[in-house]
Amino acid sequence: MYKKKALQKIVEDFSAALEQGHAAVYRRDFDSDSYEYMGGYIKEITGYATEELTPALWDTLILRMEQKGELKGLSLEEANRRVRSGQVKRWQADLQIKTRSGQTRWVTDMSTVLRDGKGDFFGSLGVLMDITDRKEAEKQLANLTERLRLRNQEIEADLAMAREVQHALVAQQPKYFPLDSGEGHAQLFFHHRYIPAAMLAGDFFEILPISDHEVGVFICDVMGHGVRAALLTTFLRGLIEELMPKADDPGTFLGKINHSLRSVFCQDGALLFATAFYLVLDVTTGKMRYANAGHSQPLCLQPGVGKIKRLTLHENVSEPALGIVEEFDYSSSESTLSSTESLLLYTDGLFEAYNETEEMYGEERLEDVVRRKLHLDPEQLMDDVILDVLRFSGSDDFEDDVCLLSILPHQYQLH
């Protein structure tokens, strides 16, 4: 009797403390299927007074039950059976109930099974806590999460479509020139490798037929990669098409692009730039006119003598990237491409790859591997160069976009 009174006193004291946190302590007897004790806060939760609430009445209030732990997924009847038989020692469930006034509330029920001196299970000691606010917050969070998931799906679908468009634009670039000559009578052949570092890329190239004997080749590397870079490439592609009447003069062409880029994107002081190299080649004479806006100089491959060289710049002066200097006058340089030479254009993602010691691959290594691969056809040469860079970095991917473009005269021969 003393122990029972002592336990009752402990339960009452514990209940009084928990009621400050919107909870009611209870002690349930399995044999009589009654509450030997129920905390006074139960009326705040259900609308029923302590003396009115019975286990049977409580069960009728339950609209929905989310079992936790070992009871997860079980019905109320099966959960009760397992608890009363001692198969499960702890009960935990979130319950949606209908109160006396018709309100819907959420309550969490946490209890542990009690044993007598013989080890038999005779009841449970538990806590009922109002978690309506928490459940509402969880519901709002779940709704927000679902909306975000759907929005992310839309964004991913849009990005995937944009990626497909980018790849399609690259794939649609001419593979030979003149376009109407047919591959068997072409004067120039183009081969490329295009490797975006992210879903969308900031590198691209354009083959621009200027006349029946002149073709323009534009290669560009927009600052960064991803959506922002891809948007700028879209702008630049449109700008190139708009400026085609100036495309026969490389210096003027880059100057017009630079002016438009700064006019549209650089008014708020933000730094937004792109490196570019533009070449105009006359297939009847091999004469080349070109201008460079902060881009790597293309390599001229001479397999007949086992050498490579870089196209020389006007006065050997490097000129700024597009978008850096307002109203800059880009200069044009000239040289000649013979039938025994080819060109290799590329973006800096190819050589700005780092190994585990933070050493950069660099253009010196690039020149060396190209020199060693001069005997290969352009497709295999580009593949071997890419493989060499990846081996150096110890990675399967590039951290920046990579674009390579090979230009071969029709009489080009490997030696």
Image (spheres, grey):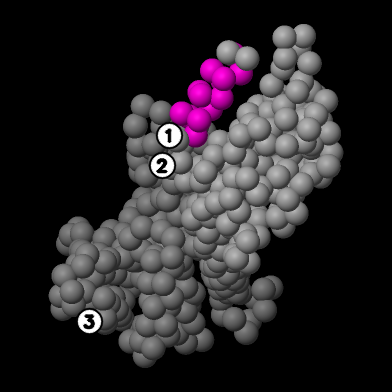
Q: Position of residue 219 (x, y in %)?
A: 41, 66
Q: Residue at x 58, y 42 (%)?
A: 128
Q: Residues at badges 2 and 1 in contact (C-beta under 8 Å)?
A: yes
Characterize the local packing of mark 2: few (<14), some (14-19) or many (20 or more) Cα atoms within 10 angstroms: few
Pointer 1 local density, CA inside 10 Å: few below 14, some 14–19, many at least 20: some
Q: Considering only vertical position in the picture, is 223 above or below 240?
A: above
Q: Main secondary structure of the magenta part?
A: helix
Residue 372 makes an appearance in the image: no
- In the picture, the disc for residue 20 is 2
Q: Residue at x 51, y 53 (%)?
A: 44
Which amino acid, mark 3? Ser
Q: Is residue 100 magenta?
A: no
Q: Secondary structure at mark 2?
A: helix
How far separated are the C-alphas under marks 3 and 1?
Answer: 69 Å
Q: 136 above or below 212?
A: above
The segment highlighted magenta reads: 3-15
In the rendered image, which residue does mark 1 sit on?
A: 17
Q: Secondary structure at mark 3?
A: helix
Q: Which residue is mark 3?
A: 263
The circle on residue 204 is none
The crowding category of the residue bearing disc 3, from other C-alpha atoms within 10 Å (few below 14, some 14 to 19, many at least 20), is few
The disc, 2 or 3, on the residue closer to the chain's N-terminal end is 2
Residue at horizontal 73 percent and vertical 30 percent from the top? 29
Question: What amino acid is at disc 2?
Answer: Gln
Residue 13 magenta: yes
Relative side of 269 to 286, left or right: left
Q: Earlier in the sequence, mark 3 or mark 1?
A: 1
Image spot of residue 221 (x, y percent)? 37, 62
Q: Amino acid at mark 1?
A: Ala
Front position among marks 2 and 3: 2
